[in-house]
Image (spheres, rainbow, N blue to C red):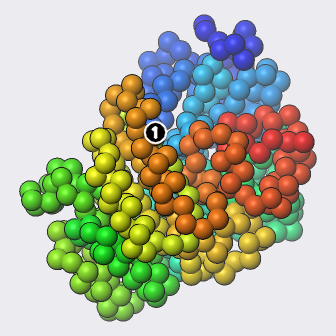
């Protein structure tokens, strides 16, 4: 068995199998190649073992074995990390996907959820009761990593970030102890896991607040993407009632079955809209977006909220590079830069995304959670998807130039959208006072940096 230079020479696979009754997959097992895959297929890593626990006690055993044996430990909820943190070369992957228990308290409007659930699974289950917790915009993302990063999605303006719904969590720390953390019990750790990522332990269960969200007016609206339409869409989204959250995805249109042939090869804006409120008011709120230009496709309609996740998951990209940042202006010059850079890309698919923030997210004090970018107006993401790894330098250079051209406002990035971009970029995710506080919590709960496969906050 091969091990990377940073790993010990022997892997305690037999000890893992004894501890977990066979829910351990190692090289040579039939399920190994599929089990080691993550969403972004460019991360082709070969762990020494993939472990699938079913409860917190088993998680604690795996953490202890990784700590005592010196093996690198990767923690995976849904496997969507842009940096490939759910994979390991020669280490142990703690795969939480078998942990999907959900306990809903309808009277209190709360839910305890194990962190192997995806956003779509959770939303469908609680949606049967006309309730919701705000997650992201992709149903297959695991709620573990998404929540620890902050969680920006379809309810961000109406109800805030995912962490703004978080009431408590169960966390296995580096010493193998299972802690219940909330505003009264281990409040320093509770503060840190709300935006500080997976630096502090393995979150095995979350307790969320549920909100009444039944029928929404939502879906995709596709418009021709001139600079005027892009700027107009963003301005309307920012001025809309807080019940409406909007995401603008701008790209040069590839062949798509729902687009007319004449739109292919031209810039289009694929707007994702979600109005969480009265249906008639929602129809009025989306009407101005339809009036920006003659729609190329209009899928916005009243629907049960869980259906908004039904069509968003496409095939996994073979190769992708992306950069994100917060911006405070998204007017005409930014819209012109978007169209100009998209036309210059040689990638089969190049995308610029603008998320309009504000509302409930902005009313939480910046120091209340480790996610501190509460007052930023927009979040921008640019990316290129392609097939051949040797093209990566060309597309990375394009992405870097594009992202730099959008630099309106002070630096800052959402930790959940960071790839493997270096320590300086991780520091951009946190103001200095937040960073120093995170370092103190890390030093207390993980002084040896066992949990380092993440956007890492090193201990003192």
What residue is drawn where x is 61% and y is 9%?
2
What residue is drawn where x is 64% and y is 65%?
410
State the image quarter where residue 150 is shown: bottom right
What residue is drawn where x is 40% and y is 38%?
395
Quadrant where the N terminus sits is: top right
State the image quarter where residue 222 is shown: bottom left
Q: Percent x, y for residue 67?
A: 80, 28
State the image quarter where residue 302 is shown: bottom left
Q: Is residue 258 above or below residue 234?
A: above
Q: Percent x, y for residue 181?
A: 80, 59
**Which one is nearer the viewer's eye here, 258 or 65?**
258
Q: Which residue is mark 1?
A: 396
Extreme residue in the left direction: 261
Q: Is residue 23 above or below residue 324?
A: above
Q: How many marks?
A: 1
Q: Can residue 386 be seen from the camera position used here?
A: yes
**Which one is nearer the viewer's eye here, 262 or 73?**
262
Q: Percent x, y for residue 437?
A: 85, 57
Quadrant where the C terminus sits is: top right
What residue is drawn where x is 39% and y is 90%?
278
* Element carrying mark 1: helix
Q: Percent x, y for residue 18?
A: 69, 22
Left or right placement of residue 132 versus residue 345 in this view: right
Mark 1, other Cα within 10 Å: few <14 / some 14–19 / many ≥20: some
């Amino acid at each position: 068995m091969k091990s990377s230079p940073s790993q010990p020479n022997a892997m305690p696979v037999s000890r893992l199998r004894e501890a977990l009754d066979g829910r351990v997959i190692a090289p040579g097992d039939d399920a190994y190649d599929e089990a080691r895959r993550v969403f972004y297929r460019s991360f082709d890593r070969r762990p020494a073992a993939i472990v699938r626990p079913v409860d917190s006690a088993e998680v604690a055993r795996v953490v202890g074995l990784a700590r005592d044996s010196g093996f690198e430990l990767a923690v995976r909820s849904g496997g969507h990390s842009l940096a490939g943190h759910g994979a390991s070369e020669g280490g142990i992957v703690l795969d939480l996907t078998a942990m999907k228990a959900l306990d809903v308290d309808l009277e209190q409007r709360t839910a305890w959820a194990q962190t192997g659930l995806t956003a779509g699974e959770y939303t469908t289950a609680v949606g049967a009761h006309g309730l919701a917790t705000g997650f992201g915009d992709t149903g297959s993302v695991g709620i573990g990593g998404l929540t620890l990063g902050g969680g920006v999605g379809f309810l961000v303006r109406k109800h805030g970030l995912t962490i703004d719904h978080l009431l408590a969590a169960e966390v296995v720390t580096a010493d193998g102890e299972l802690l219940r953390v909330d505003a009264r019990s281990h409040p320093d750790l509770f503060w840190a896991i709300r935006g500080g990522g997976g630096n502090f332990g393995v979150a095995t269960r979350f307790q969320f607040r549920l909100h009444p969200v039944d029928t929404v007016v939502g879906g995709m609206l596709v418009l021709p993407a001139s600079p005027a339409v892009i700027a107009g869409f963003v301005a309307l989204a920012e001025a809309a009632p807080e019940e409406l959250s909007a995401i603008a995805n701008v790209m040069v249109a590839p062949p798509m079955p729902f687009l007319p042939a004449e739109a292919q090869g031209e810039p289009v804006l694929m707007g994702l809209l979600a109005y969480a409120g009265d249906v008639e008011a929602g129809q009025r709120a989306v009407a101005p977006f339809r009036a920006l230009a003659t729609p190329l496709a209009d899928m916005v309609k009243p629907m049960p909220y869980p259906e908004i996740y039904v069509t968003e998951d496409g095939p996994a990209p073979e190769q992708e590079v992306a950069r994100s940042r917060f911006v405070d202006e998204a007017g005409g010059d930014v819209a012109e830069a978007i169209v100009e850079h998209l036309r210059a890309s040689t990638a089969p698919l190049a995308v610029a995304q603008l998320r309009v923030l504000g509302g409930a997210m902005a009313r939480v004090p910046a120091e209340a959670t480790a996610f501190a970018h509460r007052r930023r107006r927009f979040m921008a993401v640019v990316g290129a998807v392609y097939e051949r790894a040797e093209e990566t330098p060309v597309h990375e250079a394009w992405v870097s130039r594009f992202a730099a051209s959008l630099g309106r406002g002070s630096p800052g990035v959402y930790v959940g959208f960071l790839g493997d971009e270096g320590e300086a970029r991780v520091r951009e995710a946190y103001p200095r006072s937040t960073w120093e506080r995170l370092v103190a919590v890390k030093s207390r709960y993980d002084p040896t940096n066992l949990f380092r496969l993440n956007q890492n906050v090193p201990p003192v």
